[in-house]
Image (tube, rainbow, N blue to C red):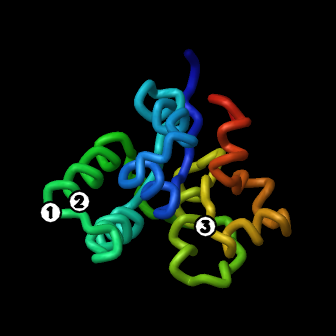
């Protein structure tokens, strides 16, 4: 099959996949499950996912939260922070999203898949095109299993 596409999925995409089971994005989850894609994360991103799963808005009991978290964390590879010189990243207007850019950089991701407006704004400015693509889940579906 070749080398897996290295991707970072932000929290809103994770919610679509693991909480809402959005059928439009089922092929993205299948790519993770069959190893065509390798999800990259770190403790900060996982912590945000765990925290958001507990929001009362989602009405998830402890077992449902644990199932969503465990399923994703079992599919993802944790990326340590880069040591030494790091490629400078532009600052995201939403500081909470900076960690996804850092994981994408430090994990040599090919794609950052997001629905977040602040991250997508960076994509339009093309400041990170030399490192990784920032794409919507809809766009990621069109990319297939290769970046």
Q: Residues within 10 Å of mark 3 (few under 14, many from 20)?
A: few
Q: Find the residue positioned furthest to the left.
A: 63
Task: Kindly identify which residue carries mark 1.
Answer: 62
3D distance between C-alphas at marks 2 and 1: 5 Å
Task: Kindly identify which residue carries mark 3.
Answer: 85
Kindly indicate the quadrant of the structure image that contains residue 147. top right
Task: Kindly identify which residue carries mark 2.
Answer: 65
Q: Position of residue 75 (x, y in %)?
A: 36, 40
Q: Earlier in the sequence, mark 1 or mark 3?
A: 1
Q: Position of residue 128 (x, y in %)?
A: 76, 62
Q: Is residue 56 above or below residue 16?
A: below
Answer whether labels 2 and 1 touch (C-beta < 8 Å). yes
Label 1's element?
helix
Residue that appears at 51% across and 31% down: 31
Q: Is residue 21 left or right of residue 99?
A: left
Q: Nearer the viewer, mark 1 or mark 3?
A: 1
Residue that appears at 38% across and 45% down: 76
């Amino acid at each position: 099959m070749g080398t897996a596409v290295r991707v970072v999925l932000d929290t809103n995409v994770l919610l679509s996949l693991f909480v809402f089971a959005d059928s439009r994005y089922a092929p993205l989850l299948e790519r993770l499950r069959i190893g065509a894609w390798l999800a990259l994360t770190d403790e900060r991103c996982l912590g945000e996912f765990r925290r958001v799963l507990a929001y009362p808005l989602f009405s998830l009991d402890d077992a449902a939260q644990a199932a969503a978290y465990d399923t994703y964390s079992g599919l993802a590879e944790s990326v340590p922070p880069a040591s030494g010189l790091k490629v400078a990243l532009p600052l995201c207007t939403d500081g909470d999203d900076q960690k996804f850019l850092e994981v994408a950089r430090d994990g040599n991701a090919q794609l950052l898949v997001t629905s977040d407006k602040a991250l997508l704004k960076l994509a339009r400015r093309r400041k990170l095109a030399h490192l990784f693509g920032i794409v919507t889940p809809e766009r990621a579906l069109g990319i297939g299993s290769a970046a």
